[in-house]
Image (cartoon, rainbow, N blue to C red):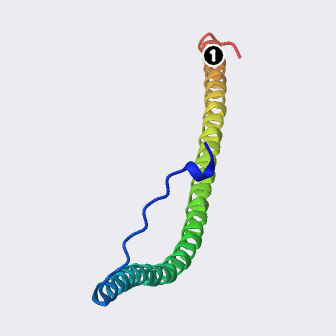
Amino acid sequence: MSASALPVPPTPPSPTHPQTAEARAAFTASLLSAGTSTVESDLKSRAGDLHANTATIDKQEQALLKETKNLGREGDKWQKVVDDGARGVKETGDVQNWAEMLERDLCVLEDTMAMVDEEAGNVNQAGSHGLANGHR
């Protein structure tokens, strides 16, 4: 098929009346202006919202950074309290261990004193028996 054999679309009929041409031009212009102004106003409104939201987000970001620093300081304070508590528990454990060692030593001393008293009692008994028998 050659290029000359392709069908040619029909050309729209030219307006026969000048009023029709004016009406078509006015209609096209109103469509363009209505579409453009609506889209343009929507875009301008959205752009304004974006700028306003950006400022708000920046303020919120600064507040968040400030609060994050405050939270870090609070965390450090609580860590100090925990460390002091752990140290106190360790010291209590050391004191308990020391008291148990002291108690064992006192028990050994008590047993030793009981054995000394028992030996002294045996010596006294032997001595008193010897006196009763006239031995000295």
Q: Position of residue 93 (x, y in %)?
A: 61, 42
Q: Is residue 135 above or below residue 28?
A: above
Q: Position of residue 19 (x, y in %)?
A: 28, 89
Quadrant that contains the C terminus = top right
Quadrant that contains the N terminus = top right
Q: Is residue 31 left or right of residue 8?
A: left
- Residue at image coords 62%, 56%: 83
Q: Is residue 34 above or below residue 87?
A: below
- Residue at image coords 46%, 59%: 9
Quarter where residue 17 is shown: bottom left
Quarter where residue 76 is shown: bottom right
Q: Is residue 21 left or right of residue 10?
A: left
Residue sitting farthest toward the right: 136
Q: Position of residue 68 (x, y in %)?
A: 56, 69
Q: Is residue 109 above or below residue 27?
A: above
Residue sitting farthest toward the top: 133
Closer-to-camera residue (109/80): 80
Give the residue pinned by disc 1: 122
Q: Amino acid at mark 1?
A: Asn
Q: Secondary structure at mark 1?
A: helix
Quarter where residue 128 is shown: top right
